[in-house]
Image (tube, grey):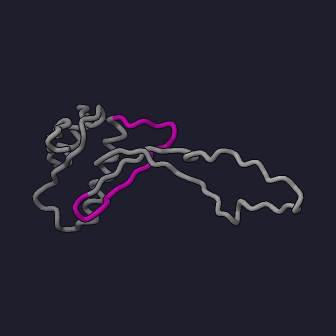
Amino acid sequence: MDETWLYHYDPKTKQQSMEWQHSGSPCPKKFRVQKSTGKIPASIFWDQGGIILIDYLSKDQTINAEYYSSLLVQLKDNLMEKHRGKVTKGVLFLHNSAPAHRALATQKKLAYMGFQCLDYLPYSPGLA
């Protein structure tokens, strides 16, 4: 599991940006192109088979223990649907040490759902 920022663009094609002009008229001024029109945070859950769940956060929402716990419920539903009958021994779960992940409510939710958390090691030069 990881959270990331996704940039969304609204590009124009050459055809869309063309303007009709007379041959003697000056060239239109072009404004500096922005890197993106916006960005949104996304929570992505995956396993060895690919992506299980992507959730896009709304503009006025933050990732807290309550939101993250609700994501875990969605994850379990998607996981059971994707791997129907294959999950028999439990789920090993790895996420970083963000405050929403370490919260007591989140830890209780993980234990209730039967997910076993793996320890997330801090940055290690040997792993880099």
Q: Is residue 18 magenta?
A: no
In the rendered image, the residue lying farthest to the left is: 89
* 11 relative to 110, above or below: below
Q: Horizontal and vertical percent for residue 100?
A: 30, 35
Q: Residue at x 23, y 67 (%)?
A: 84
Q: Relative to the observer, which residue lies in front, 54 or 25?
A: 25
Q: Which residues are magenta?
A: 47-64
- The answer to which image quadrant residue 83 occupies is bottom left
- Residue depicted at 31% across the width and 59% down the height: 52
- Kindly indicate the quadrant of the structure image that contains residue 111: top left
Residue 114, percent from left and from top? 16, 49
Is 54 magenta? The answer is: yes
Considering every residue shown, the one lying at the far front of the view is 24
Residue drawn at x 60%, y 45% as measured from the top left: 34
Q: Is residue 49 left or right of residue 91?
A: right
Q: Residue 94's x, y, as percent?
A: 20, 46
Q: Relative to 56, is 51 on the left or the right?
A: left
Q: Look at the picture and state if 16 lies above or below 111.
A: below
- Front residue (pair 51, 72): 51
Q: Quadrant location of the C terminus?
A: top left
- Apparent side of residue 89 relative to residue 37 in the rendered image (left or right): left
Taking 27 as reference, is 95 left or right? left
Identify whether 56 is placed above or below 84. above
Give the total number of marks visible in the rendering: 0
Q: Position of residue 55 (x, y in %)?
A: 40, 51
Identify the residue shown where x is 29% and y is 63%: 50
Query: To which quarter of the image does residue 80 belong?
Result: bottom left
